[in-house]
Amino acid sequence: MVKKLIGTIALALCVSAFLFSQEATTYQRHQISVNASKFVVLFNEQVNNLDLSYRYSFQKTKRLRLASSIDVSSEEGDSKDYEVRLGYDFDIKEIDRWNFYTGFDLTFGQGINTSSERVNSQYGSYIFLGVLFKMGNHFSLSTEPSLAILGKTRQDPNSFDPDANSSWTEVKLLNIGQIKVGFHF
């Protein structure tokens, strides 16, 4: 256990030295990001969820976005959740290694519980304000707190509850404190 901990710390120090020694001057068109909490879990053998996003810069300050989130549970209840987002963002201000941007995503997602045949769907939009820190030409850390306006529906064919099949609208804050690890190429 101690050897693994020392090895992990040594690896983290080497990677951070490599990342921070790069100069952030080159403009990259493509970016793939992974939610940092999910990125750490990728190295675990029991990975059952993934949160990826892709950004394409068609101009230096304007980008198209495509993101997906997939969560598959093989535990009792056996559920599958997915979400697909398509959007646009643009820079507000760039200062040294910091980039401040805003934009919106259109979203559609479903949560399916196979044992009860219950389906929860959501659709709507996220309006966000993002902050990106360039660690070098090819790596970044970012966060995008969002205001989500979502329409939701629930379909439960096996329920006797009259509210089991319903729809409603939610407005809520999302992704507060979520950090993304970005790879630029």
Image (tube, rainbow, N blue to C red):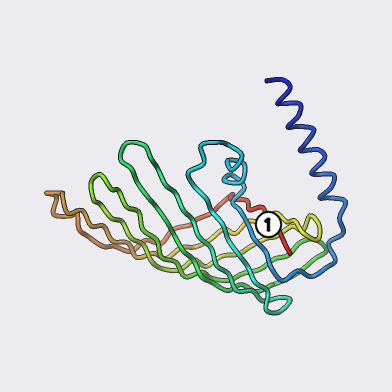
How many marks the image carries: the answer is 1
Q: Is residue 132 left or right of residue 174?
A: right
> What residue lies at 32% left-to-right and 62% top-to-bottom?
152
Residue 23, compared with residue 49, is above or below; it is below
Spot occupied by residue 84 in the image (x, y as percentages of width and height): 46, 63
Residue 117, compared with residue 59, is above or below; it is above
Q: Quadrant of residue 165?
A: bottom left
> What residue lies at 37% left-to-right and 50% top-to-bottom?
80
Q: Is residue 125 left or right of residue 119?
A: right
Q: Quadrant of residue 74?
A: top left
> What residue lies at 23% left-to-right and 57% top-to-bottom?
155
Spot occupied by residue 121 in the image (x, y as percentages of width and height): 33, 60
Q: Nearer the viewer, residue 117 or 90?
A: 117
Q: Nearer the viewer, residue 96 or 30?
A: 30
Screen quadrant of the N terminus: top right
The residue at the far top in this view is 2
Q: Secondary structure at mark 1?
A: strand
Q: Is residue 185 left or right of residue 71?
A: right
Q: Nearer the viewer, residue 177 or 33?
A: 33
Name the residue beneath numbered marker 1.
Answer: 182
Callout 1 amino acid: Gly
The residue at the far bottom in this view is 59
Spot occupied by residue 164 in the image (x, y as percentages of width and height): 19, 53
Q: Nearer the viewer, residue 151 or 46?
A: 46
Q: Is residue 103 left or right of residue 151?
A: right
> What residue lies at 46% left-to-right and 53% top-to-bottom?
70
Screen quadrant of the C terminus: bottom right
Spot occupied by residue 41 in the image (x, y as percentages of width and height): 58, 40
The residue at the far front in this view is 45
Within 10 Å of the Cα at label 1, are there few (<14), some (14-19), or many (20+) other Cα atoms? many
